[in-house]
Amino acid sequence: MVRHLVMWTLKEEAEGASALENGAKMKEMLELLNGRIEGLQHLEVSYDIIAAEPECHIVLCSEHDDVDALNHYQGHPEHQACVSFVKKVASGRKALDYVI
């Protein structure tokens, strides 16, 4: 099993919406991937960050069967549609993948 963690900082305003509005849209878009991509066991997103160092506005945690499943998820068209939106609204990104 592989866990995939991503933390983003968001632009104050992008795509005609505030960071909070875009965080909510990201959460909705990404969580819709649950059950839609083979090898993706679970995905959750939060924009209600209590504390983070370095600062972030939104976090994703997903679990995948193995590295091949993670690679499949990352290239999947439905995930890539999310990536297109995120690239427009995010100002920074940190990611970590590890075996559990």
Image (spheres, helix red, strand yellow):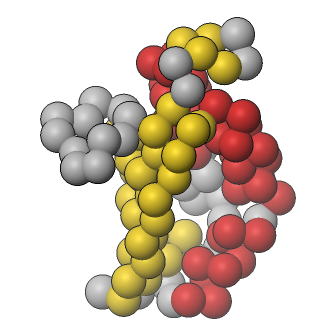
Foreground pick, 97 / 31? 97
Query: Residue at left 17%, top 40%?
Result: 51
Residue 69 in sight here: yes
Examine the image and state in which quarter residue 42 appears. Answer: bottom left
Query: Residue at left 72%, top 34%?
Result: 88
| Up-down relation of residue 89 to residue 33 (above or below) | above
Query: Residue at left 29%, top 49%?
Result: 54
Examine the image and state in which quarter residue 20 appears. Answer: top left
| Up-down relation of residue 75 to residue 78 (above or below) | below
Foreground pick, 94 / 43? 94
Residue 62 in sight here: no
- What percent of the width, then of the height, locates residue 10? 51, 32
- What percent of the width, then of the height, locates residue 5? 41, 64
- What percent of the width, then of the height, locates residue 68? 63, 89
Q: Is residue 50 left or right of residue 86?
A: left
Query: Residue at left 39%, top 47%?
Result: 59
Examine the image and state in which quarter residue 4 appears. Answer: bottom left
Q: Is residue 3 left or right of residue 54?
A: right
- Quarter of the C terminus within the rendering: bottom left
| Up-down relation of residue 41 to residue 45 (above or below) | below
Toward the right, the furthest residue is 77
- What percent of the width, then of the height, locates residue 62? 44, 64
